[in-house]
Image (spheres, grey):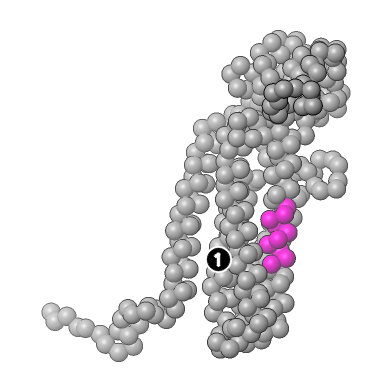
Amino acid sequence: MDTTVTTGTEDSVWGGGNRPLGASYGKLMMWFFIVSDALTFSGFLVSYGFSRFKFIETWPIADEVFTHVPFFHGNYPMYYVAFMTFILIMSSVTMVLAVDAGHRMMKNRVILYMFLTIIGGAIFVGSQAWEWATFIKGDYGALETKGGRILQFVNADTGKRAALADFARTLPEERVKHEKSEGIWYQEEGYKTSYSLNEVIQGFRANPNILIRTETINEEGEKTLLTRGESLEKLNDAVMVVEGANLIRNEYGSRLFADFFFFITGFHGFHVFSGVVINVIIFFNIILGTYERRGHYEMVEKVGLYWHFVDLVWVFVFTFFYLV
């Protein structure tokens, strides 16, 4: 059978050159970057999923970790994270409108929608910074055992978490800090918790309505709450006070959770911040009429591809960290 070689339109489409499939070089390179970056994020999220299900019995419950809303006191699980997600998705919508306006060569509308996109991205980055600060600072405090397990405290009367400040006693045991003005050699002190281990233990023993909750999740999907007797016995395993979360310790539970949280959300936040910076540059070029003189707004479309990718990645990050 003879092999037929097609020519004409199909041959020209697949003919290679610097515009395969009609895409410009810059747009094609953006797609290459997005694909490679998607593989990177996929590797991070797969690692997170593997670690979570390996230590699922001690993994923190998101509804008990992300409960804060700026300027409001109380327990609002996932509210602010949902707000952040909504803002980022809406910024993707305004980016679509900016690209559409660019195709129509409507400069003023491109300026408006790009400005709204920048505002949305800036709000998201600022919100993520606030969430990091809250996560690092902590809210209740806990104890860490010899084996690295976390012991949290619960008020038996209300069934709610109890902060160290609610029951810890202030004892006259704290050393006087060596003053800088009086010392020949002086070194700044490192991080110091609000209460010592002994102050927490003494306060716990003096308050019979305080119980210990371990980081192990029971069959009901909740942290295991110990009886008063079990709590007093478990207290003997405590070796230090933990407040907040960092790359070494985590008052909410498994330290791996904090490691992945800082790394993955930080990596995504860097992408969003970079996108905001790029959008600002594009925004001023639009105002100056750079793309109007070129006769097209392809640069807006290319940065739009990146922005949509960042939004899509956050949907997966949000699902893995906060919903699942």
Examine the rendered structure and indicate whether residue 101 appears above or below residue 94: below
Examine the rendered structure and indicate whether residue 65 appears above or below residue 10: above
Identify the residue at the far front of this view.
184
Q: Residue at x 66, y 16 (%)?
A: 239
Inspect this view and state whether residue 86 appears: no
Examine the rendered structure and indicate whether residue 110 appears above or below residue 266: below
x, y percentage for residue 90? 69, 65
Q: Residue at x 19, y 83 (%)?
A: 4
Residue 68 as seen in the image, left or right of residue 89: right
Q: Residue at x 35, y 82 (%)?
A: 13
Identify the residue at the far left of this view.
1
Residue 311 as seen in the image, left or right of residue 75: left
Q: Which residues are magenta?
A: 118-127
The residue labelled by disc 1 is: 306
**On the rendered image, what quadrant is the C terminus found in?**
top right
x, y percentage for residue 53? 53, 35
- Dominant secondary structure, magenta: helix
The picture quadrant where one finds residue 144 is: top right
x, y percentage for residue 216? 63, 25
